[in-house]
Image (cartoon, grey):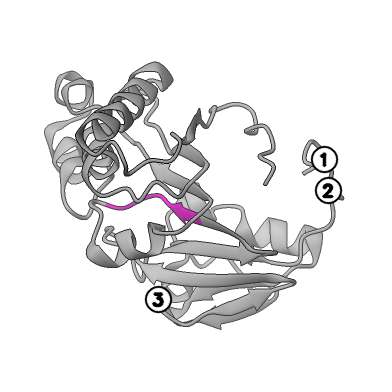
Amino acid sequence: MVEAGLRPNGLDGIVLTHEHADHAGHAAALAQEFNAPVYLAEGTRQALREGQRLPRVEHFQPGQRFTVGDIEVAPFLVPHDASDPVAFRFQAEGVKIAFAVDLGFLTTLVKEHLRGCDCLVVEANHDLEMLRRGPYPWFIKQRVMSRLGHLSNHALAEFLEFEFDGAARHLVLAHLSENNNSPEVARLAATQALERRRVRFPLSLAGSPEVHVTPRSAPLAPLRF
């Protein structure tokens, strides 16, 4: 937040996609430190561990918009092995940003919410061959590859080649697996898919989006609109 020019204590709210520890593990501590409400679906609240006692809670229904400060938030359901998992589309001052990670495939509903956005933050979790050859036990590999698991580079590339509307100026590849993907592999899959789309549908992209890959150990540099 400091790197983006924001006050480090300036949180108006915390929104949760689902209850898994890598997404909600520190929600209670953050909420207490920043005195900020936590917005979450009822299924997420029920599924949180007993130790996650949130001091201030605001419930939302997937499909019903709400506001946090001057940001309109549209939560929408995604296919994942969690209780009431959602992704979000944020809108403020005419800018729309979609945030969709932890989903097994891109449903029609998800694709609709990705349309018309200035920035897409989308999961590129794993390379299929790296996952198949990797160290995970087979039952975890099956979970990751399932329709309630995680989005692969290949699945995202298919969307970019055939169904991406070309509106986004920034494409952010997020939630990369440490063992089953790499920034270089994920970026190559996305950029090659965008190039194939340009060849296949030459009038569909006014300009290719800038492709970013979220680093594991540092924040992504601020994006300006």
SS of the residue at dot 2? Answer: loop
- Considering only vertical position in the picture, is 151 above or below 57? above
Pointer 1 and pointer 2: residues touching (CB < 8 Å)? yes
Number of marks in picture: 3
Q: Identity of the amino acid at label 3?
A: Gly
Is disc 3 surrounded by few (<14), some (14 to 19) or many (20+) residues within 10 Å? Answer: some
Q: Residue at x 75, y 68 (%)?
A: 36
Q: Of marks 2 and 3, which one's residue comes earlier in the chain?
A: 2
The magenta segment: 98-103
Q: Is residue 94 magenta?
A: no
SS of the residue at dot 1? Answer: loop
- Farthest residue toward the front? 203
Q: Looking at the rendered structure, which numbered label has been put on residue 2?
A: 1
Q: Residue at x 21, y 44 (%)?
A: 162
Please indicate whether residue 50 sits to the left or right of residue 79 in the image.
right
- Considering only vertical position in the picture, is 138 above or below 183? below
Say which of 11 and 187 sits in front. 187
Does any portion of residue 127 appear in the rendered image?
A: yes
Q: Looking at the rendered structure, which numbered label has been put on residue 6?
A: 2
Q: Between label 2 and label 3, give the one nearer the viewer.
A: 2
- Considering only vertical position in the picture, is 148 above or below 77? above
Q: Residue at x 12, y 33 (%)?
A: 138
Q: Identity of the amino acid at label 2?
A: Leu
Q: Residue at x 24, y 29 (%)?
A: 199
Q: Looking at the rendered structure, which numbered label has been put on residue 43?
A: 3
Instruction: Report the quarter where the N terminus lies.
Output: top right
Q: Identity of the amino acid at label 1?
A: Val
CA separation in Å, label 1 and label 2: 5 Å
The x and y percentages for residue 63 are: 41, 79
